[in-house]
Structures are given as structure tokens and as C-alpha cells.
Amino acid sequence: RLGEEVEHIAAGIDGAADVKLEQVTGLPLLTVSPDPAALARHGLSVQEVQDTVAAAIGGAPAGQLFEGDRRFDIVVRLPEALRTDPRMLASLPVPVSLPASRPASTASLAVDAVDRWVPLGELARIEVTRGPNQIGRENGKRRVAVTANVRGRDLGSFVAELREAVGERVALPEGYWIEYGGTFEQLISAGQRLAVVVPLVLLMIFGLLFMAFGSAKDAAIVFSGVPLALTGGVAALWLRGIPLSISAGVGFIALSGVAVLNGLVMISFIRRLRSQGRTLDQAITEGALARLRPVLMTALVASLGFVPMAFNVGTGAEVQRPLATVVIGGILSSTLLTLLVLPALYRMVHRREARAA
């Protein structure tokens, strides 16, 4: 019942598709429930009734057949048409032995020890019920799974909305709980790893820039290309209607390294011109003009390399498209930063030094 409620709620969430409840019922079961009072009247035990039913349905050994050096067991039981019909099973005779000679099992009961025969229907209730066709367990606890695909929105917001709706509309009895797994569980795990990896990568990038320039100011100027590149990646995802995913997060990590490449080339050239005696404005102007073509060519080549992935519709498209979209959008925005904003930032930072010189 609780699974059906969750299934109904999930189907009503925007973006839900292929919502299914794991089938756990529907298997027909033939149930024989002995009546203790009837058994007492006839002097029978539950074990004797169980032995009779087991012999009739499951079979009882009646001997062996030898064929050469091979041996076959002979098992007798009711025909299939009788085994599956509750009305026919109700007429199954159950032997009632003489009080002084009752054996332990009716499967080997001698005919001369039988006092009388009693129909099974007088001793037990026979009915066909619907039982579980499987019992799922996880960590020793029973569980039932509700599965769904998410289309047209990001998985994180879908699960957040579903969690809120389930919390408001489903009253869980004591001992019951709901867990959200599958791809969402992987997303949470990946997010936790990215929370460690991304700051570490950014720190390493800044450290490499500082080692290359020997100046924290110049390293910070080049590093400023990362935020604008990330903004371009987010904007590209929004324009294409692609939700944020694990592959998009990987694309942002790759973009962080690509974003500083053009800035590194331009700032290095400007620093070289200044070391040759150019003034600050002359070095910035000549550096920006001289590196215009290399910067554009680098951005164009890098972007075109990801175009097939960005528009892939075949196998692996769900992984390639977000990654390529992030990289292309970030490269375009970081290129604008390199050509327009980066020279201005460099002049603002080093203007006071140039005046003092």
C-alpha cells in the first residue's frame, strides 16, 4: 500500500517518466489451513494432515525402478488438474488410524490400520489466495522499490520535490523508512567527491600560475578567467535546456584548466614586452593585438573539437552532451575575458607601479 502511494505521488511530479512499482504480489497460492477443533474431533494432528497434503501435491516415494545399473525413484501424487483445484482437494481422503496403531506418518500408513477416511474439506479450509511472488531484502530488511526516470529537469530538484511531497502525504508507520538510491545516490556521492576535487584543482591551478609568474597579482589576473568561464558554461547549459549532471561537473573541472590557457599566453607576452622596455600601455596594446589571432584560433579549435560531442544523439549522448556544452560555452566566455577584460584588469593592477617607475 505504501509503495502504491509513493508511486502515485512520483507519477505526479513534473519530469517523472516510466514510474513503476516493483511487483511483489499476484502469485496464486493454494492455502490449506487446518481447523484445530475438527482435528480434535477426529483425533488427528496437524502433522498427519500436512503429510497427507504433501503426499498428494508434492508426491510420496512408492518404490524404485531398476533398469540395468540405473535406479529410478517412483513417486506418486495427484494429477495436476486435481492438485490445483480447491474443490477436488476438499474431497481428498485423510486416513484416521486406529487409536492403538497410529503411525507417525500417513505416507506409510497401512490400510489395515485405518479406522476411517475423512475428507480434507472437513478438516481444513482450502482456498486460493494472492501472495508475494518475491520478497526483496536489503541488509536483512524487507523492501519494495519504486523506479522512475527523470526527463526534462535535473535529478536533484526532482528528488527534492518528491521527498517533500512524500513527507507531506505519506504517513510512515514505525519501523518504515524511504531511501532514494540509483542514479541519485551516485549523484550525491559524486557531488561529495567534487566538493573536494574542485577546490583542490583550483588551488593547484593558482599555484601553477604563481610558479609561472612569480607574482600573486598576475596569477590572480589570469585566474580571474575561471569564474567567467564557469558562468559561460552555466549559461550554455541553460540555453540548451540541459540539466546539471555529473558529466557537466566534470566539464567544469576541465574548463577550469582551459580557461586560464589564453590568459597565460597573453599575460606572459605582455610581461615580456615590459621587460624589453615598453611602457605599460604600449605593452598592453601590442600584447593584445599580437595575441588576438592565437587566442581566437585556440578558442576556435578547442570549441570545434567538442561540437560533435555537443550534438551527439547516439550512444553516450547523455554523458557527452553536458560535458561538451559546458566546455564550449566556457571557452567562448573566457575568450571574451582574455581579449577585453584581461588587459583592462592588468592595467588597473599595475598602473600604480607604472606611475612610480
Image (cartoon, rainbow, N blue to C red):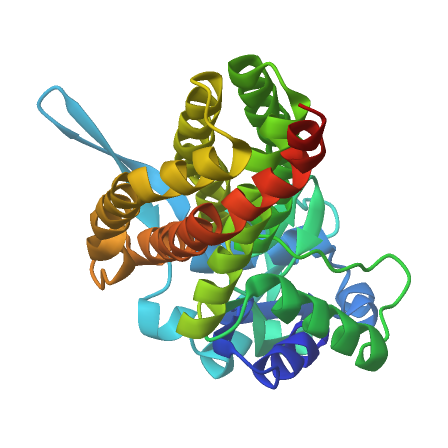
Q: Farthest residue in the bottom direction?
A: 12
Residue 284 screen position, x and y as percent? 47, 38
Q: Quadrant of the N terminus?
A: bottom right
Instruction: Answer whether residue 244 is visible to the viewer in this image.
Output: no
Front-most of residues 221 and 270:
270
Up the image or down, 267 lies above or below 100; here it is above
Kindly identify the residue that appears in the image at 65 percent across and 42 percent down: 348
Q: Quadrant of the C terminus?
A: top right
Q: Where does the image place residue 153, in percent across and percent down from the top left? A: 52, 72
State left or right for residue 321 relative to residue 138.
left
Return the residue nearer the eye: 265 or 132: 265
User: From what the image shows, is residue 40 above or below residue 341?
Assistant: below
32 or 15, which is in the foreground?
Answer: 15
- For the point 57% across and 28% down, the residue is 201
Residue occupying the point 41% across, 34% down = 266
Query: x, y (%) of residue 293?
Result: 25, 44
Where is residue 329 drawn, in percent x and y?
41, 57
Q: Is residue 348 visible?
A: yes
Asked whether, in this view, residue 195 is left or right of residue 234, the answer is right
Residue at the extreme right of the image, as rendered:
174
Near-viewer residue (46 or 274): 274
